[in-house]
Amino acid sequence: MIRKYLESSPEINPDWIRYNQLPMMSRTKSGDYIPPDTLNKMIRTFGATIEGEFKELLKCANACPAHIVRIESFLECDIAFEVFGEEMVPDFFPGEIVLVNMVDRNTYIYDLPYIIITNRINVLRFIRNSKNPDTLILEPSSANVEPVEVSKTEIRQLFLVKGKIRKYH
């Protein structure tokens, strides 16, 4: 299995997979590797903001925080979450990592996935237009789960899903 993984990702350092020896990438550009002490400082700095802006985000019903090694294009995102539950299948499978950015709660775009924070629910859903101009439909991907209608004023925070990392099957 390790051989197959290395064949599909030749830039990965084989010793990182086998023995957890750094660096993770054997073919890196300058600046791709973050030493552990620097990474710990970054995590502590980020942790200080959790009590503020991100506190409610960590209570999302079907996604939980995940640690991501620095990958250049992911630096534009605020936080990474691991998806769990079947509510968003087939768009988001359990175990996938979603990368999100906090956006203004009034600047949503219909039909895109968001983590929506309200006083009563915190979920990963698609935002759909409602017949009522004062509400939005929070729709799961699964037909087995009912959509939820929320007032636009109920939304406290909004995190746009910018990308995802799908596990190799």
Image (cartoon, helix red, strand yellow):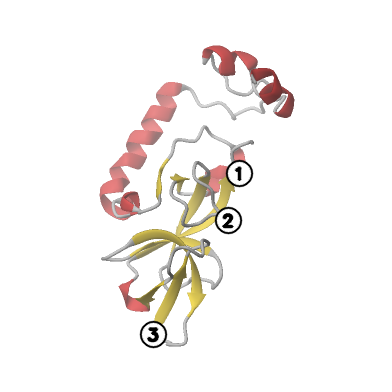
The answer, for residue 27, to whether it is visible in the render is no
Query: Residue sitting at 51 percent across and 61 percent down?
Result: 142
Give the structural element (helix, strand or loop) at label 1: helix
Q: Amino acid at mark 2?
A: Asp
Q: Residue furthest bottom?
A: 132
Give the structural element (helix, strand or loop) at label 2: loop
Q: Residue furthest front?
A: 144
The residue labelled by disc 3 is 134
Disc 1 crowd rating (10 Å Cα; few below 14, some 14-19, many 20+) is few
Q: Amino acid at mark 3?
A: Asp
When the figure is inspected, residue 22 is found, relative to residue 65, above or below; the finding is above
Disc 3 crowd rating (10 Å Cα; few below 14, some 14-19, many 20+) is few
| Mark 1–mark 2 distance (CA, rounded to whole Å) | 21 Å
Query: Residue sitting at 70 percent across and 28 percent down?
Result: 9
Image location of residue 167, percent across then percent down: 59, 38
Quadrant of the drawing holding the N terminus: top right
The residue labelled by disc 1 is 73
Left or right, 132 with respect to 58, comes to right
The residue labelled by disc 2 is 91
Give the structural element (helix, strand or loop) at label 3: loop
Quadrant of the drawing holding the C terminus: top right
Sequence-wise first label, 1 or 3: 1
Image location of residue 17, percent across then percent down: 58, 18
Disc 2 crowd rating (10 Å Cα; few below 14, some 14-19, many 20+) is few
